[in-house]
Image (cartoon, rainbow, N blue to C red):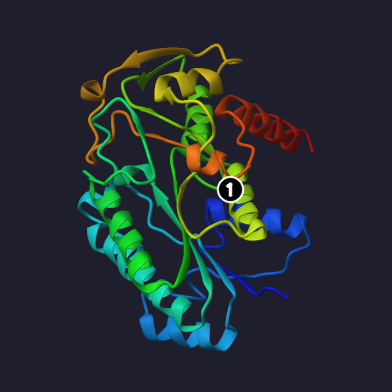
Amino acid sequence: MTRILITGANGQLGTELRHLLDSRGMTYKATDSSELDITDAPLVNDFFLSYRPDVIFHCAAYTAVDNAEDEAKELNQLVNVDGTRNIAQASAAVDATLFYISTDYVFGGDEERTYKVEDAPAPRNEYGRAKFEGEKAVRRFASKFYIIRTSWVFGEYGKNFVYTMLKLAETHKELNVVSDQIGRPTWTRTLAEFMIYTLENGLDYGTYHLSNEHSCSWYEFARAILKNSPVRISPVSSNEYPQKAWRPRHAVLDLSKTEATGFAIPTWQEALDDFMQELKRAGND
């Protein structure tokens, strides 16, 4: 029996992954920071030597992008770089397969093109830098690994753009949303399904890009989320909505390598519709 370990098991992706594994009758060990502090290298090593996982879904991460620029810069480094290095080294020690979740923010996003797996990263904010450093640690120390870059993640089990828009629509008649940042939304369900697909089909080790098909601006994404709401949504530029951390203007991930594996990727519109239907059913229960 494959021994599966999930880090960050109570986060947005970790929770989605747990529910998907449960639905397939797959057993696993779920950990969060209270049980496994990934920034403590001796603790991580002892934990791995004791449990001896075959597969690690490394979902633990620090994701507050703006705070990573200043007040949480050290925490960003500890979790996304040092923690990932500890996990990678421990994975190699027990000859386990490591899944590491990275981000479109490893790219600068200054060019209007899709970013291929082999394109050279050039992060422009602290979060992207730390996640890229995490990638390098995985490549250096892990013997068997998958790096999966994703973007604009939304899902049922955590804070995300969809929930933010739905919440704002309860108290606002008008909303301004940035229209000059282009990317690909990703449903956590699609991401979790690809992780399991990768494992079950024994895909070649290496780096993959996974988001939902098609691209859009945050403004277009917001309009789709609130298409049944009377709220008026107006497009604004990034200059009109300044943020501490640099946001890529056009970080569209190329999905061709993932598509070539045979994994069926829904469009973000399809994924959003399915997600909204699930929220509606849950609200009626």
Q: Residue at x 47, y 88 (%)?
A: 46
Q: Position of residue 212 (x, y in %)?
A: 54, 34
Look at the picture and state if 230 lies above or below 142: above
Look at the picture and state if 108 lies above or below 178: below
Q: Secondary structure at mark 1?
A: loop
Residue 156 seen from this side: no
Q: Which residue is mark 1?
A: 157
Q: Residue at x 32, y 29 (%)?
A: 250
Residue 228 or residue 5, whichever sits in front: 5
Q: Position of residue 34 (x, y in %)?
A: 49, 73
Q: Quadrant of residue 268?
A: top right
Quarter that holds the N terminus: bottom right
Q: Position of residue 251 (x, y in %)?
A: 34, 34
Q: Quadrant of residue 83?
A: bottom left
Q: Amino acid at mark 1?
A: Tyr
Quarter that holds the C terminus: top right
